[in-house]
Amino acid sequence: MEYHYGRLLDHIHLVVADLPASKRFYTAVLQALGRELTGEGPDYFWADELFVSCGSPASRSHVHLAFQTADPARVQRFYQAGLAAGGGDNGQPGERPYHDGYYAAYLTDPDGNNIEAVFHGPHWRSAASIQVQPRCQDVAAPFTVCE
């Protein structure tokens, strides 16, 4: 068994009903964690991988979750595997206008959430994860404890 620590998640996009209330909340909890907002606009704000915007009631029921990949081929594999597993097409693999080299594909999961795989290019935000081998010991069947 192998665990990966690092940047599996690229960003999380939450759509909220009351942006000022959400901004107050996230500012407070992030400050408690030693973090702060990274930026903001008239209808959004963000902190590192968390992006929050205001939307209509219909749009607030879903989450946009983006997984970072090491190359465009993995974006394509994500897309094909997701379709094969019952996901819905929400945007075929390809370049997007967000910045040069933004290569992504979008699927909807069984609950309608927007799930993305993205490759930013080797010089942008994509980074390798840290791999560790857990130390495991059998305790009492059927349990195994791993550190």
Image (cartoon, rainbow, N blue to C red):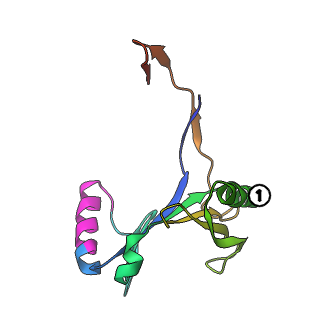
**Residue 109 versus residue 41: which sits nearer the camera?**
109
Task: Please name the residue shown 26% across and 79% down the image.
Answer: 18
The range drawn in magenta is 22-35
Q: Main secondary structure of the magenta part?
A: helix
| Direction right: furthest residue | 73
Q: Position of residue 121 (x, y in %)?
A: 70, 64
As drawn, 27 above or below 135: below
Which quadrant of the figure contains the C terminus? top left
Task: State the SS at label 1.
Answer: helix
Residue 131 at x, y percent in the picture: 59, 36
Q: In which quarter of the image is residue 15?
A: bottom left
Q: Is residue 40 visible?
A: no
* Residue corresponding to mark 1: 73
Three-letter residue code for mark 1: Ala
Mark 1 neighbour class, 10 Å CA radius: few under 14, some 14 to 19, many 20 or more: few
* Residue found at x 65% / y 73%: 91
Q: Say which residue appears at 65% left-offset and 65% top-offset.
A: 120
Q: Where is residue 13 in the image (x, y as percent from the top left)?
A: 45, 69
Image-quadrant location for residue 40: bottom left
Quadrant in which residue 50 is drawn: bottom left
Q: Which of 108 and 137 is in front in this view?
A: 108
Query: Can residue 32 be spotted in the picture?
Result: yes
73 left or right of 18 in image: right
**In what quadrant of the picture does the N terminus appear?**
top right
